[in-house]
Amino acid sequence: MKSSSLLRLAVAGALAGLAACAGVAKVSDVTSQVSPDYAGHAVTRVMVEANTRDLEARGKLETAICDKITSETGTGCVRAIDNFMAQQTYTGDEVESGMEKVGADALLSIEVNKNPAPPATTAARDAAAAPPPKAAAQDGISRPWSAFEMLLISGSERKMMWYATGRTGPGATWDDLIASLPQDLTKKLIADGMLKPKS
């Protein structure tokens, strides 16, 4: 099977039926789950993929995440955009080979879902969360709600090691996500034992 997303190639169909969690403000607290098969298995070098067609946003988000990971952990980090052509389809074997070339033992993919259904709320909360009139939506980040999910996949076994979700609040932009997510994501990966903090 082929897909424009590196991660979807590696774990096609693994996410069916999973929903994003609710949150407020720029980026909500990240809610995560560790696979029992990989508990305590820290990654040594990760490849980061921001799965969006907006090349500028993708480059900035992958860079921000790698910068945060390398500054706060002992884990190496490479950007997928530097190793795979955007929007080109790859087989699972090609993805694995590309990761091996740069020494990455896991793939971290961030998927931002455009126009997800809003969480169930009261009428008062819905009114409070409503966006300003004529608020424009950006690619991948749409008002008033935009969910995102993050997956960490083993490069050689192509199995899910870790899964997390979050949600932006009203008025969030790509800049908000780029400024907030790297810290929240790195903190959660360290807490869950997927990355080792610098000693």
Image (cartoon, grey):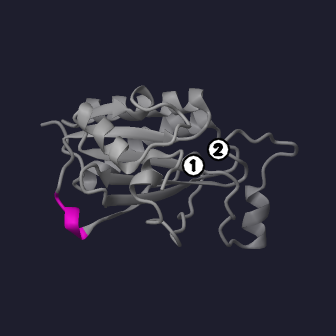
Determine the secondary structure under disc 2: loop
Q: What residue is at 21 percent from the left and 67 percent from the top?
A: 37
Q: Position of residue 21 (x, y in %)?
A: 53, 64
Q: Amino acid at mark 2?
A: Gly
Q: Position of residue 111 (x, y in %)?
A: 52, 49
Q: Amino acid at mark 1?
A: Val
Using a 10 Å C-alpha cutoff, classify the residue at mark 1 as few (fewer than 14 neighbours), some (14 to 19) or many (20 or more).
many
Q: What residue is at 73 percent from the left and 57 percent from the top?
A: 129
Among the 4 quarters of the image, the one containing residue 46 = top left
Left or right of 54, for residue 71: left
Q: Position of residue 28 (x, y in %)?
A: 52, 53
Using a 10 Å C-alpha cutoff, classify the residue at mark 2 as few (fewer than 14 neighbours), some (14 to 19) or many (20 or more).
many
Numbered mark located on residue 184 in the image: none
Q: What residue is at 48 percent from the left and 56 percent from the top?
A: 1
Question: Against 97, is 13 above or below?
Answer: below
Q: Is the residue under label 1 in contact with that under label 2 (CB below 8 Å)? A: yes
Question: Against 196, is 17 above or below?
Answer: below
Q: What residue is at 34 percent from the left and 52 percent from the top?
A: 152
Read off the magenta span.
Answer: 36-40
The answer to whether residue 37 is magenta is yes
Q: Quadrant of the C terminus?
A: top left
Numbered mark located on residue 140 in the image: 2
Q: Which residue is mark 1?
A: 112
